[in-house]
Amino acid sequence: MQGTGVTNYDSKPSYGFSAATTEWDDALMKRGIRTHEQAMIAKGASPAEASRLTQLREGTDTNRETEWDTGKQSPDEGDESDDEDFLDDDFLVQYRQQRLHELQSEQSAKTKKGTNFGAVIPISRSEWTREVNEASQENGGIWVIVCLTTSDTERTGAVEHAVRELAFVCTKLKFVSIPSHHAIPNWPESNLPSLFLYRNGTMQHELLRLPQNTNKDDLEEHLKQLGVLDDT
């Protein structure tokens, strides 16, 4: 654990931050989960400053090792508990819990900005109200695109692929998928490929019997014509 440093960003004022590593940082670095540079960047250092601090730290560690190469016993030597390895399991459990909490916090923050998507979310019929109707009312009304799927890849495979590609780039739109026979019992296969477009709690448009060779560009054009992409 070492002193303090100052981070310098181009065209931004410098501000102080602590360059001392915490016990948690030390534990992560010891197990190879986090580097010293990553710990410094997480504290607010620029990449260049983090690299400089890491080099200083490595130089200090090297000098310390040289002192004890003379045959003297390190004061820490022999203090390690024989059962330290058994503590790793508890540590990893704690680390996973912390990372899960961080990811959930990041996801929550993204949800508030309306940019928490980027993939197609599979849903069940019991989740429809929450994931479609209610979700489409969030943030002043967002678009939720429901893709009905089937095991007949020849009929719907191309459209499902196009939906996945579009979901990746249109992160302000929420894309969900559900097997057609789960969503609507006895839904005619002749209506597939089918997409339902929801906003403000209700279905605004439906796209039925899309061409089986529909690609991402085709689907994007459909949504543009309907005004779905106006806010993306």
Image (tube, rainbow, N blue to C red):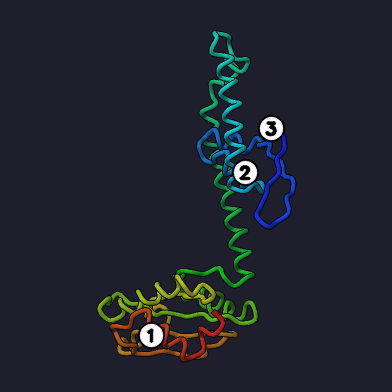
Circle 3/circle 2 CB separation < 8 Å: no
Residue furthest to the top in view is: 71
Q: Which residue is mark 1?
A: 194
Alpha carbon separation for disc pair 3 and 2: 14 Å
Q: Is residue 131 above or below residue 13?
A: below
Please give the name of the residue rendered at 46% of the width and 72% of the height, measured from the top-left corner.
169
x, y percentage for residue 142? Answer: 57, 80
Q: Which residue is mark 2?
A: 49
Say whether residue 108 is visible. Answer: yes
Please give the name of the residue rendered at 62% of the width and 37% of the height, measured from the top-left corner.
53
- Asked if residue 124 lies left or right of residue 24, the reply is left
Alpha carbon separation for disc pair 1 and 3: 61 Å
Mark in front: 3 vs 2? 2
Q: Is residue 165 above or below residue 2?
A: below
Q: Quadrant of the C terminus?
A: bottom right
Q: Which three-letter amino acid code belongs to the residue tagged 1?
A: Ser
Tag 3's secondary structure?
A: loop
